[in-house]
């Protein structure tokens, strides 16, 4: 009888040890979702997919966001070993600003807490301009909206376009002309200013507060080089003509 009790105790103990060895593991396909640049009011729902790679049922007990603008939804039923699940995240895209949020997932997995991240930018195309290489352009960080700002076209002579601007704050002025890197130069009060590519195809300038004159000039290097070459050729031609005249005059003097 004592042997039977001992065997039962050992068997029960081994079952307990084996049960304790079984754990749930949560593995996400990605822990960061990039919304990219999206329009105000666009679909804000994204899904984090995961799989239980352990050998025990996975129970997601809580999902919490760092902001009320982000609403996460967790699975209600346990995720069995080998099966997959989803964490749905809905961001409020009525907010026009950068997206930088964290969703904390708590479960009974070996890794009990996972920090998921979402990022991106919500823009309003009616009032927002998309700028390429923004981090490399000086003066963009402290631009503020000025509803009273004005820009007026003075004249357009194809190769030269002139404007006047007036604002109480520094502004990013987006012009209706196509951005073309080669040849165009911009000047604010006769001081050269960098041309910015905005909204994929348009050109823009960072304009200081106050009243200013703005001038765009088209001076491509090829035309400049052609003018130099043409001028040089003309000089050589005239020198040749003068040399011929001088030689003719000398020959005439010798024959007299």
Image (tube, helix red, strand yellow):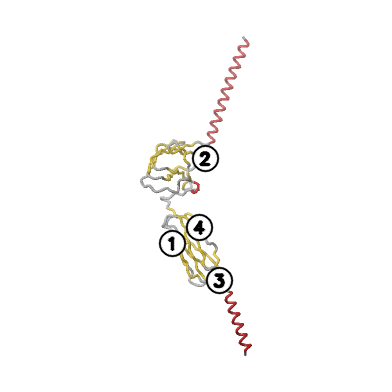
Please tell me which of labels 1 and 4 falls first in the chain: 4
Residue 8: x and y in percent read 60, 85
Residue ID for mark 1: 67
| Residue nearest the viewer, comparing 215 with 245 | 215
Which of the two discs, 1 and 2, labels the residue nearer the N terminus? 1
Q: Earlier in the sequence, mark 1 or mark 3?
A: 3
Query: The residue tagged with tag 1: helix, strand or loop?
Result: loop
- When the figure is inspected, residue 235 is found, relative to residue 7, above or below; the finding is above
Query: Which residue reaches farthest bottom?
Result: 1
Q: Nearer the viewer, residue 233 or 63?
A: 63
The image quarter containing residue 90 is bottom left
Q: Secondary structure at mark 3?
A: loop
Q: CA distance from mark 3 to mark 4?
A: 28 Å
- Give the distance between the C-alpha atoms of the residues marked 2 and 3, in whole angstroms: 60 Å
* Alpha carbon separation for disc pair 1 and 2: 45 Å
Disc 4/disc 2 C-alpha distance (Å): 33 Å
- Chain-order first, disc 2 or disc 3: 3
Q: Residue furthest top?
A: 256
Disc 2 residue crowd, few under 14, some 14–19, many 20+, Cα 10 Å: few
Q: How far is mark 1 from mark 3, CA to CA?
A: 29 Å
- Residue annotated with mark 4: 34
Write down the residue under mark 3: 24
Residue 52: numbered disc: none
């Amino acid at each position: 009888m004592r042997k039977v009790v001992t065997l039962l105790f050992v068997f029960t103990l081994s079952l307990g040890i084996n049960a304790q060895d079984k754990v749930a593991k949560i593995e996400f396909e990605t822990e960061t979702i990039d919304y990219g640049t999206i329009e105000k009011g666009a679909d804000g729902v994204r899904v984090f997919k995961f799989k239980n790679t352990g050998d025990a049922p996975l129970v997601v007990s809580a999902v919490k966001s760092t902001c009320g603008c982000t609403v996460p939804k967790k699975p209600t039923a346990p995720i069995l070993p080998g099966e997959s699940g989803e964490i749905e995240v809905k961001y409020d895209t009525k907010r026009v600003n950068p997206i930088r949020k964290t969703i904390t997932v708590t479960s009974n997995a070996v890794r009990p807490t996972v920090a998921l991240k979402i990022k991106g930018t919500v823009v309003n195309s009616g009032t927002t301009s998309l700028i390429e290489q923004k981090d490399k352009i000086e003066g963009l960080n402290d631009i503020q909206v000025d509803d009273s700002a004005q820009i007026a076209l003075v004249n357009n002579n194809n190769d030269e376009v002139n404007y006047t601007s007036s604002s109480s704050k520094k502004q990013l002025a987006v012009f209706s002309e196509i951005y073309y890197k080669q040849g165009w130069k911009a000047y604010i009060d006769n001081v050269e200013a960098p041309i910015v590519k905005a909204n994929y195809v348009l050109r823009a300038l960072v304009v200081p507060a106050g009243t200013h004159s703005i001038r765009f000039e088209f001076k491509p290097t090829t035309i400049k080089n052609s003018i130099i070459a043409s001028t040089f050729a003309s000089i050589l031609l005239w020198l040749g003509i003068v040399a011929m005249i001088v030689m003719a005059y000398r020959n005439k003097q010798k024959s007299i």
